Amino acid sequence: MKPSAEPRTSLFVPESGLSDRVDYRLMETPEEKDCIYLMRYKAYLHGGVTAPSESRRVSDHYDDAPNAWIFGIYVDGELCSSIRLNVVTSECRISGSADLFGDVLHPRLDQGEVFIDPLRLAADPEKARRFPDLPYLTVRLAYLACEHFNADTGLALVRAEHQAFYRRVFMSEVIAEPRSFPGFLPKVSLLASDYRTVREKVMTRFPIMRSTSVERRMLFQRAGERRFSPRGVVTSFEQASIVPTS
Protein backbone atom coordinates (compact mmCIF):
# COMPACT_ATOMS: atom_id res chain seq x y z
CA MET A 1 0.00 0.00 0.00
CA LYS A 2 2.95 2.30 -0.49
CA PRO A 3 2.15 5.22 -2.83
CA SER A 4 4.23 5.50 -5.99
CA ALA A 5 5.27 8.57 -7.96
CA GLU A 6 2.39 8.50 -10.48
CA PRO A 7 -0.49 10.98 -10.92
CA ARG A 8 -3.04 10.51 -8.15
CA THR A 9 -6.32 11.86 -6.93
CA SER A 10 -6.56 12.74 -3.24
CA LEU A 11 -9.68 11.44 -1.53
CA PHE A 12 -9.50 14.01 1.22
CA VAL A 13 -10.20 17.33 -0.44
CA PRO A 14 -13.45 19.29 -0.09
CA GLU A 15 -14.42 18.95 -3.74
CA SER A 16 -13.95 15.17 -3.74
CA GLY A 17 -17.29 14.53 -2.03
CA LEU A 18 -15.64 11.93 0.18
CA SER A 19 -18.74 10.73 1.98
CA ASP A 20 -20.38 10.04 -1.38
CA ARG A 21 -17.38 8.17 -2.79
CA VAL A 22 -16.22 5.86 -0.01
CA ASP A 23 -18.00 2.82 1.43
CA TYR A 24 -16.84 0.55 4.23
CA ARG A 25 -18.40 -2.88 3.79
CA LEU A 26 -18.27 -5.72 6.28
CA MET A 27 -17.53 -8.81 4.18
CA GLU A 28 -19.39 -11.80 5.62
CA THR A 29 -20.54 -14.15 2.87
CA PRO A 30 -18.20 -16.68 1.19
CA GLU A 31 -18.55 -14.76 -2.07
CA GLU A 32 -17.63 -11.44 -0.44
CA LYS A 33 -14.65 -12.96 1.33
CA ASP A 34 -13.45 -14.60 -1.88
CA CYS A 35 -13.21 -11.16 -3.50
CA ILE A 36 -10.96 -10.10 -0.63
CA TYR A 37 -8.78 -13.21 -0.89
CA LEU A 38 -8.29 -12.58 -4.61
CA MET A 39 -7.31 -8.96 -4.04
CA ARG A 40 -4.91 -9.94 -1.26
CA TYR A 41 -3.16 -12.34 -3.60
CA LYS A 42 -2.91 -9.72 -6.34
CA ALA A 43 -1.57 -7.13 -3.91
CA TYR A 44 0.88 -9.41 -2.13
CA LEU A 45 2.21 -10.94 -5.34
CA HIS A 46 2.69 -7.45 -6.80
CA GLY A 47 4.51 -6.40 -3.64
CA GLY A 48 6.75 -9.45 -3.61
CA VAL A 49 5.60 -10.60 -0.18
CA THR A 50 3.98 -13.89 -1.14
CA ALA A 51 4.86 -16.72 -3.50
CA PRO A 52 2.76 -17.58 -6.57
CA SER A 53 0.02 -20.14 -5.96
CA GLU A 54 -2.47 -22.00 -8.13
CA SER A 55 -5.40 -20.88 -6.02
CA ARG A 56 -4.54 -17.20 -6.58
CA ARG A 57 -5.94 -16.45 -3.15
CA VAL A 58 -4.54 -15.52 0.25
CA SER A 59 -6.50 -16.55 3.33
CA ASP A 60 -5.96 -18.21 6.70
CA HIS A 61 -7.97 -19.66 9.54
CA TYR A 62 -8.09 -16.29 11.31
CA ASP A 63 -10.47 -15.03 8.60
CA ASP A 64 -13.26 -17.26 9.93
CA ALA A 65 -12.58 -16.72 13.62
CA PRO A 66 -15.51 -15.53 15.76
CA ASN A 67 -13.52 -12.43 16.75
CA ALA A 68 -12.70 -11.41 13.16
CA TRP A 69 -14.16 -8.59 11.09
CA ILE A 70 -13.11 -8.35 7.42
CA PHE A 71 -13.77 -5.07 5.66
CA GLY A 72 -13.65 -4.02 2.05
CA ILE A 73 -13.00 -0.36 1.31
CA TYR A 74 -14.77 0.81 -1.85
CA VAL A 75 -14.21 4.04 -3.76
CA ASP A 76 -16.80 4.95 -6.37
CA GLY A 77 -18.24 1.45 -6.01
CA GLU A 78 -14.93 -0.32 -6.72
CA LEU A 79 -13.09 -2.49 -4.21
CA CYS A 80 -9.80 -0.73 -3.45
CA SER A 81 -8.43 -2.17 -0.23
CA SER A 82 -9.17 -4.43 2.69
CA ILE A 83 -8.29 -5.07 6.31
CA ARG A 84 -9.05 -7.81 8.82
CA LEU A 85 -9.49 -6.93 12.47
CA ASN A 86 -9.29 -9.49 15.27
CA VAL A 87 -10.54 -8.35 18.68
CA VAL A 88 -8.28 -10.18 21.11
CA THR A 89 -9.25 -10.68 24.75
CA SER A 90 -8.29 -13.04 27.55
CA GLU A 91 -11.34 -15.15 26.64
CA CYS A 92 -10.74 -15.15 22.86
CA ARG A 93 -7.08 -15.14 21.85
CA ILE A 94 -7.45 -16.08 18.18
CA SER A 95 -5.05 -13.76 16.41
CA GLY A 96 -2.07 -13.90 14.11
CA SER A 97 -0.10 -11.57 16.34
CA ALA A 98 -1.07 -13.44 19.51
CA ASP A 99 0.15 -16.70 17.96
CA LEU A 100 3.37 -15.30 16.52
CA PHE A 101 4.23 -13.18 19.57
CA GLY A 102 2.48 -15.18 22.26
CA ASP A 103 5.38 -14.79 24.68
CA VAL A 104 4.87 -11.03 24.52
CA LEU A 105 1.07 -10.76 24.35
CA HIS A 106 -0.33 -13.61 26.43
CA PRO A 107 0.99 -12.27 29.75
CA ARG A 108 -0.73 -8.97 28.96
CA LEU A 109 -3.95 -10.77 28.03
CA ASP A 110 -3.73 -12.60 31.35
CA GLN A 111 -3.90 -9.16 32.97
CA GLY A 112 -7.11 -8.34 31.13
CA GLU A 113 -5.83 -6.21 28.24
CA VAL A 114 -7.88 -5.99 25.06
CA PHE A 115 -6.06 -5.76 21.73
CA ILE A 116 -7.16 -4.84 18.22
CA ASP A 117 -5.03 -6.84 15.81
CA PRO A 118 -5.26 -5.50 12.24
CA LEU A 119 -3.79 -7.92 9.74
CA ARG A 120 -4.04 -8.80 6.05
CA LEU A 121 -4.02 -5.21 4.88
CA ALA A 122 -4.11 -5.20 1.11
CA ALA A 123 -4.75 -2.70 -1.65
CA ASP A 124 -5.36 -3.13 -5.34
CA PRO A 125 -2.03 -1.99 -6.88
CA GLU A 126 -3.64 0.26 -9.49
CA LYS A 127 -6.01 1.84 -6.95
CA ALA A 128 -3.15 2.38 -4.51
CA ARG A 129 -1.35 4.43 -7.16
CA ARG A 130 -4.42 6.52 -7.86
CA PHE A 131 -5.39 7.20 -4.25
CA PRO A 132 -2.41 8.11 -2.04
CA ASP A 133 -4.63 8.42 1.03
CA LEU A 134 -5.87 4.84 0.82
CA PRO A 135 -3.62 3.57 3.66
CA TYR A 136 -5.11 6.15 6.05
CA LEU A 137 -8.63 5.29 4.98
CA THR A 138 -7.94 1.59 5.54
CA VAL A 139 -6.20 1.67 8.93
CA ARG A 140 -8.85 4.10 10.19
CA LEU A 141 -11.02 1.03 10.74
CA ALA A 142 -8.55 -0.33 13.29
CA TYR A 143 -8.71 2.95 15.15
CA LEU A 144 -12.51 2.88 15.18
CA ALA A 145 -12.39 -0.68 16.47
CA CYS A 146 -10.25 0.42 19.41
CA GLU A 147 -12.98 2.88 20.39
CA HIS A 148 -15.92 0.56 19.73
CA PHE A 149 -14.51 -2.43 21.63
CA ASN A 150 -12.94 -0.36 24.41
CA ALA A 151 -9.49 -1.69 23.57
CA ASP A 152 -6.36 -0.88 25.51
CA THR A 153 -3.89 -1.35 22.69
CA GLY A 154 -3.77 -1.26 18.92
CA LEU A 155 -1.26 -3.68 17.42
CA ALA A 156 0.55 -3.61 14.10
CA LEU A 157 2.42 -6.52 12.57
CA VAL A 158 4.56 -4.81 9.93
CA ARG A 159 7.79 -5.07 8.00
CA ALA A 160 10.60 -2.63 8.59
CA GLU A 161 9.79 -0.18 5.78
CA HIS A 162 6.24 0.40 7.06
CA GLN A 163 7.12 1.10 10.67
CA ALA A 164 7.52 4.84 10.10
CA PHE A 165 3.87 5.13 9.02
CA TYR A 166 2.58 3.57 12.25
CA ARG A 167 4.98 5.57 14.39
CA ARG A 168 3.84 8.81 12.76
CA VAL A 169 0.11 8.19 12.69
CA PHE A 170 -0.54 6.10 15.80
CA MET A 171 2.63 6.81 17.78
CA SER A 172 3.27 3.07 17.83
CA GLU A 173 6.38 1.59 19.38
CA VAL A 174 8.20 -1.66 18.60
CA ILE A 175 7.60 -4.17 21.38
CA ALA A 176 9.07 -7.25 19.67
CA GLU A 177 11.76 -7.71 17.03
CA PRO A 178 11.18 -9.28 13.59
CA ARG A 179 9.90 -12.82 13.18
CA SER A 180 8.65 -14.88 10.23
CA PHE A 181 4.90 -14.94 9.65
CA PRO A 182 3.52 -17.99 7.78
CA GLY A 183 2.95 -17.29 4.09
CA PHE A 184 4.51 -13.82 4.26
CA LEU A 185 8.04 -13.56 2.91
CA PRO A 186 9.44 -10.53 4.82
CA LYS A 187 9.91 -10.77 8.56
CA VAL A 188 7.57 -8.59 10.63
CA SER A 189 7.97 -6.72 13.90
CA LEU A 190 5.24 -6.20 16.47
CA LEU A 191 4.29 -2.58 17.17
CA ALA A 192 1.84 -1.36 19.79
CA SER A 193 -0.04 1.87 20.37
CA ASP A 194 -1.45 2.71 23.82
CA TYR A 195 -4.90 3.75 22.61
CA ARG A 196 -6.09 5.65 25.66
CA THR A 197 -2.83 7.59 25.92
CA VAL A 198 -2.59 8.65 22.27
CA ARG A 199 -6.30 8.86 21.37
CA GLU A 200 -6.75 12.63 21.60
CA LYS A 201 -3.38 13.41 20.05
CA VAL A 202 -4.08 11.19 17.07
CA MET A 203 -7.54 12.65 16.46
CA THR A 204 -6.19 16.18 16.79
CA ARG A 205 -3.45 15.58 14.24
CA PHE A 206 -5.57 13.37 11.96
CA PRO A 207 -9.24 14.43 12.20
CA ILE A 208 -10.21 11.68 9.73
CA MET A 209 -9.80 9.27 12.65
CA ARG A 210 -12.84 10.76 14.38
CA SER A 211 -16.12 8.86 14.24
CA THR A 212 -19.59 8.74 15.74
CA SER A 213 -21.11 5.98 17.83
CA VAL A 214 -23.66 5.45 15.07
CA GLU A 215 -20.97 4.85 12.47
CA ARG A 216 -19.09 2.45 14.72
CA ARG A 217 -22.21 0.51 15.61
CA MET A 218 -23.18 0.16 11.95
CA LEU A 219 -19.69 -0.96 11.01
CA PHE A 220 -19.24 -3.67 13.59
CA GLN A 221 -22.73 -5.15 13.74
CA ARG A 222 -22.98 -8.58 12.16
CA ALA A 223 -25.59 -9.12 9.46
CA GLY A 224 -28.08 -10.70 11.86
CA GLU A 225 -27.77 -7.75 14.22
CA ARG A 226 -28.42 -4.97 11.70
CA ARG A 227 -31.69 -3.12 11.44
CA PHE A 228 -30.40 -0.61 8.90
CA SER A 229 -28.01 -0.70 5.95
CA PRO A 230 -28.34 -4.48 5.40
CA ARG A 231 -25.36 -4.56 3.05
CA GLY A 232 -23.13 -3.21 5.76
CA VAL A 233 -22.30 -0.04 3.85
CA VAL A 234 -21.24 2.96 5.89
CA THR A 235 -20.38 6.33 4.37
CA SER A 236 -21.21 8.71 7.20
CA PHE A 237 -17.75 9.60 8.50
CA GLU A 238 -16.58 13.18 8.69
CA GLN A 239 -14.95 14.83 5.72
CA ALA A 240 -11.65 16.06 7.13
CA SER A 241 -8.10 16.48 6.00
CA ILE A 242 -5.63 13.77 6.98
CA VAL A 243 -2.80 16.27 6.96
CA PRO A 244 -1.51 16.46 10.55
CA THR A 245 -2.17 19.67 12.40
CA SER A 246 0.67 21.32 14.23
Image: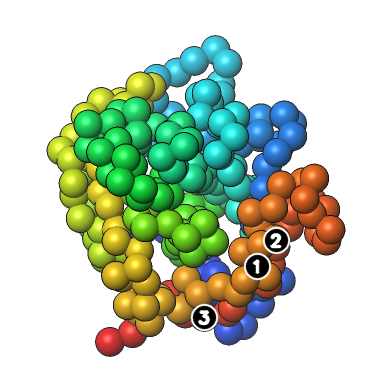
Residue 41 percent across, percent down from the top left = 51, 29
- Tell me what residue is drawn at x 48 percent, y 45 percent: 87
Residue 245 percent across, percent down from the top left = 33, 85
Mark 2 Cα shell of 10 Å, populated few (<14), some (14-19), many (≥20): many
- Tell me what residue is drawn at x 68 percent, y 42 percent: 27
Residue 131 percent across, percent down from the top left = 51, 61
What is the quadrant of residue 31 in the picture?
Answer: top right
Please tell me which residue lies in front, 5 or 43: 43
Q: Do the CB atoms of the residues marked 2 and 1 lie less than 8 Å apart?
A: yes
| Residue denoted by label 3 | 240
Q: Nearer the viewer, mark 2 or mark 3?
A: 2
| Residue denoted by label 1 | 215
What amino acid is at disc 3? Ala
In what element is the residue under mark 2? helix
Q: Residue furthest bottom?
A: 246
Real-space CA distance between mark 2 and mark 3, rounded to the nearest whole angstrom: 20 Å
Please tell me which residue lies in front, 55 or 67: 67
What amino acid is at disc 2? Met
What amino acid is at disc 1? Glu
Numbered label attached to residue 218: 2
Numbered label attached to residue 114: none
Q: Is residue 68 left or right of residue 20?
A: left
